[in-house]
Amino acid sequence: AQTVTQSQPEMSVQEAETVTLSCTYDTSESNYYLFWYKQPPSRQMILVIRQEAYKQQNATENRFSVNFQKAAKSFSLKISDSQLGDTAMYFCAFLRLQGAQKLVFGQGTRLTINP
Amino acid sequence: EPEVTQTPSHQVTQMGQEVILRCVPISNHLYFYWYRQILGQKVEFLVSFYNNEISEKSEIFDDQFSVERPDGSNFTLKIRSTKLEDSAMYFCASSPRFQPQHFGDGTRLSIL
């Protein structure tokens, strides 16, 4: 079974700083997707960024980028020039490509951006 | 942009009662899911649905739960004889194959 671990329950940075959220996962599969979802206080689940395991190039979406280390099974999220609106819970998630394609989530990191 | 729609946004129910949570997935998506998030905890998979049948379910999804796609647009989660521990946020999601899942805004279920 796949597991996803986020070792940082909470993080706090000043506005405009860069912050990196950590995620590690465990799987025996070679092909899969990884995602970061953002959950603001409204509790919606918003897709931030995705990474296909077969791609060596790290994904980027504006101020958000990932550092995907397949051999180490590590998938960290970097937020550059952080903004107050980035304050949220961030969940790392694993999607296998066999069977029912269920998402497996980590425990989440509560990120607070301070003015 | 198409969205997954969930109703109601908040449901309050007496313990022991039945509740139906409703979802309208994105119209061209083929895979449908229900997830649960107990307050302060991570999001947990409940069930996936494809081609009008359950494709996988978690150990949480016991006989108390059922899912149905009664017509071409709705996807429902029924919880029979609700318990206090069923209080949670319930998310519906849908996706095409091998694509990110799009989540609805969730239904907050409160069992009294």
Image (cartoon, coloured by chain):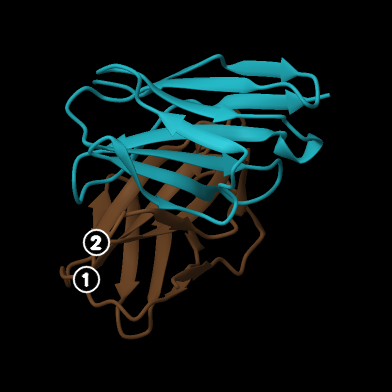
Residue under the point 38% across and 78% down: A73
Q: Nearer the viewer, residue B21 or B66?
A: B66
* Residue A81 can be seen, yes or no: no
- Mark 1 lies on a secondary structure that is loop
Whether residue A68 sits left or right of residue B18 in the image: it is: left
Task: Report crowding for label 1: few under 14, some 14 to 19, many 20 or more residues within 10 A (C-alpha).
Answer: some
**Residue B57, position in %: x, y?**
46, 51
If you read the primary sequence from the N terminus, does the residue marked by circle 2 or circle 1 appear first? Answer: 1
The lab-note entry on whether marks 2 and 1 share a chain reads yes
Picture disc at residue A97: 2
Name the tint of chain B in the rendering.
Answer: cyan
Task: Identify the residue under disc 1.
Answer: A31
Q: Label 2 is placed on what type of residue?
A: Leu
Q: Label 1 is placed on what type of residue?
A: Asn
**Residue B104, position in %: x, y?**
43, 27
- Mark 2 lies on a secondary structure that is loop
**Chain coloured brown: which letter?**
A
Chain ID at mark 2:
A
Q: Nearer the viewer, residue A33 or A11?
A: A33
Q: Is residue A100 above or below residue B28?
A: below
Quarter-wise, where is residue A33 in the image?
bottom left
Task: Report crowding for label 2: few under 14, some 14 to 19, many 20 or more residues within 10 A (C-alpha).
Answer: some
Using the numbered discs, state the Cα–Cα distance from disc 2 to disc 1 in whole angstroms. Answer: 7 Å
Quarter-wise, where is residue A29 in the image?
bottom left
Q: Is residue B89 above or below residue A14?
A: above
